[in-house]
Image (tube, rainbow, N blue to C red):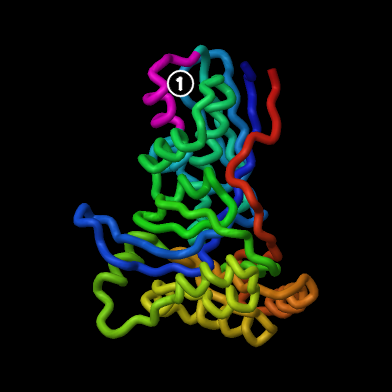
Amino acid sequence: MARQVTVQAPAKVNLCLDVVGEDGKGYHLLDGVMLAVDLYDTLTLRLEEGKGLEVACNRPGIPLDESNLAVKAAKAFLQQRGENISGKLRMEINKKIPAQAGMAGGSADAAAVLQGLNHLLGTEWELPRLMETGLSVGSDVPFCLAGGCARARGRGEKLEPLPLPGGVLVIAKPSGGNDTRKVFALYDAFEGQLPRPDVEGMVEALHRQDVKGVGRTMGNVFEPVCALESVSALVSAMKAKGALGAAMTGTGTAVAGLFANESAAQSCLESLQRQQPPLEYLGIHRPVAGGAKVVGALP
């Protein structure tokens, strides 16, 4: 059994996202397409002398109590495992995924903890068991465990694997973030007709490996609900620089633009680098096939 493991967890973007109802228990029912990208949080989990749980993070302002999904995931895993661990569990979180961006940074960390503890403690749970535990922590955690590209329904946990899209993504986040609960409240209070993304059209385009079709069907029902000028400006700027499609991801505020090739993406990135005020995050990223995974272990 290892005494230390290192886990990488990729960020998530929503290529398209719609709300299709409610489940009667206070949750909105979603339908859309999620994609894992090569932007990672890295977590190191280590068993040390002592007792309890200790958490550290490289990013100031990240809560280290049970409001952190990584802490919730650790407690859920250990409770379900039903055995006391020998020693203190220390978790070090190295965050690269921007916060309040709609990129599932907290859920990615939770997925990393579940994979890490599974390896660290020799539990050997299969992916479906980990995903079930993850759902008790957060709706995006099952996808962050599975990764790749998937149609996500229900609360986001009913996953149908899809082929990875071609192309390259530019991801940009303006300063400031959105609170997920407030965005859903804005959606509930919204009056008028909302444009609905063509989820079926995107699924068909992915199966055809039609990157232009994927771009054409990108959309997010929360984008007009939030009506943020900074988000709208990014979507417009990406399309003006040749994006096949662009949309806010999740409940925002990051925007993902899909480009046919690296050179087109690079041209957009260089243009956005000159934007004022400066963006909080900007990068070129590619789809990845997996979710959270152990990348190193020490005995």
In this rendering, the answer to whether 27 lies above or below 276 is: above
**Image check: 175 left or right of 52?**
right
Q: Where does the magenta region start and end?
A: 74-85
Q: On the image, numbered disc 1 is attached to which residue?
A: 52
Q: Residue at point 46% right, 45% down? A: 142
* Residue drawn 63% across the image and 57% down it: 37
In the rendered view of the protein, which quadrant contains the N terminus? top right
Which of the two residues, 286 or 57, is positioned nearer the viewer here?
286
Q: Is residue 174 visible?
A: no
Which image quadrant is residue 185 in? bottom left
How crowded pointer 1 is (Cα within 10 Å; few <14, some 14-19, many 20+) is rated as: few
238 is within the stretch colored magenta: no
Relative to 49, say whether 118 is above or below: below
Position of the C terminus by quadrant: top right
The residue under label 1 is which amino acid type? Gly
Residue at x-position 39% and y-position 58%: 153
Q: Position of residue 48 (x, y in %)?
A: 58, 17
Query: What residue lies at 58% left-to-right and 84% top-to-bottom?
Result: 236
State the residue in front, 125 or 14. Answer: 125
Q: Position of residue 118 (x, y in %)?
A: 53, 27
Pinpoint residue 170: horizontal percent, then vertical percent.
66, 69
